[in-house]
Each structure stands twice: as structure tokens, then as C-alpha cells.
Image (cartoon, rainbow, N blue to C red):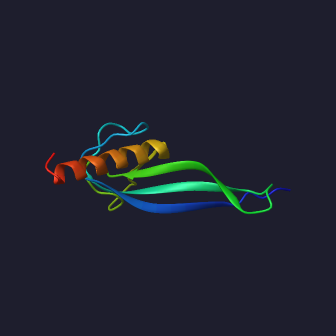
Amino acid sequence: MSTTFTRTTTRTVTFTGPFELNGMDGVQPAGSYVVETDEELIDSLSFPVYRRTATWIHLPHADGRFNGGSGMAQTALIDPDELDRVLASAETETQHSSQGT
């Protein structure tokens, strides 16, 4: 019997302007968002290696709440590489605007 070990890492990302990613319903407002990444251990190697299996972003309710009150906020399955590209693009735009270009 094989047991699969998984781990979840959580980080908070901040968008300085509205953004959109595949897997989400429309454009989201600027702000901080919790991103969770699930990984499973590849046990066929002689050293520990984890493979990413899913990346989720937590989105607020329509009224702006994340997890307060009744019900749960929406989560969306996203492409982590796309997330990194959008964050890098926003960072580049921020640096250019602060330099006056």
C-alpha cells in the first residue's frame, strides 16, 4: 500500500491594480490575496522532491469580504506561472511609474 504525502504552502500576494487570471470570473480589484499551493512528495527518489499539483487563489465575496459572515469566499484554480507573470508585470509597471517614465 502506497501513501502519498502532500503539503500545502500559503502566501499572500498583493496586486497594486485590478487584475485577471485564467480560471477566475472577471477582473478582480487591487488588494492582497491568499494563494495556496498543493504539492505531493515524489517518493521514488533517494531525496525529498515535491511536485506542484494545484495552485488556488482566494477571492472575496461580491461585497468585498473574504471569509467573514456566512458562506465561503470563492477560490479559483489558477496557473502559478501566469500568476508570477502578472505579478512581475505589475512590479515592472510600478517601478516605471515611480521613475516618471
* Residue 19 drawn at (x, y percent): 30, 43
The outermost residue toward the right is 1
**Relative to the observer, which residue lies in front, 14 or 71?**
14
**Relative to the observer, which residue lies in front, 14 or 29?**
14
Location of residue 11 with respect to 29 vertically, above or below: below
* Residue 12 drawn at (x, y percent): 39, 61
* Residue 76 drawn at (x, y percent): 44, 45
Location of residue 85 with respect to 58 vertically, above or below: above
The answer to whether residue 78 of the structure is visible from this angle is no
The answer to whether residue 64 of the structure is visible from this angle is yes
**Relative to the observer, which residue lies in front, 71 or 19?**
19
* Residue 100 falls left or right of residue 10: left
**Relative to the observer, which residue lies in front, 28 or 99?**
99
Quadrant of image for the C terminus: top left
The outermost residue toward the left is 100
* Residue 12 falls left or right of residue 4: left
* The image quarter in which residue 47 lies: bottom right
Quadrant of image for the N terminus: bottom right
The residue that appears at 43% across and 38% down in the rendered structure is 23
The residue that appears at 77% across and 57% down in the rendered structure is 43
Location of residue 86 with respect to 40 vertically, above or below: above
Q: How many marks?
A: 0
* Residue 7 drawn at (x, y percent): 61, 61
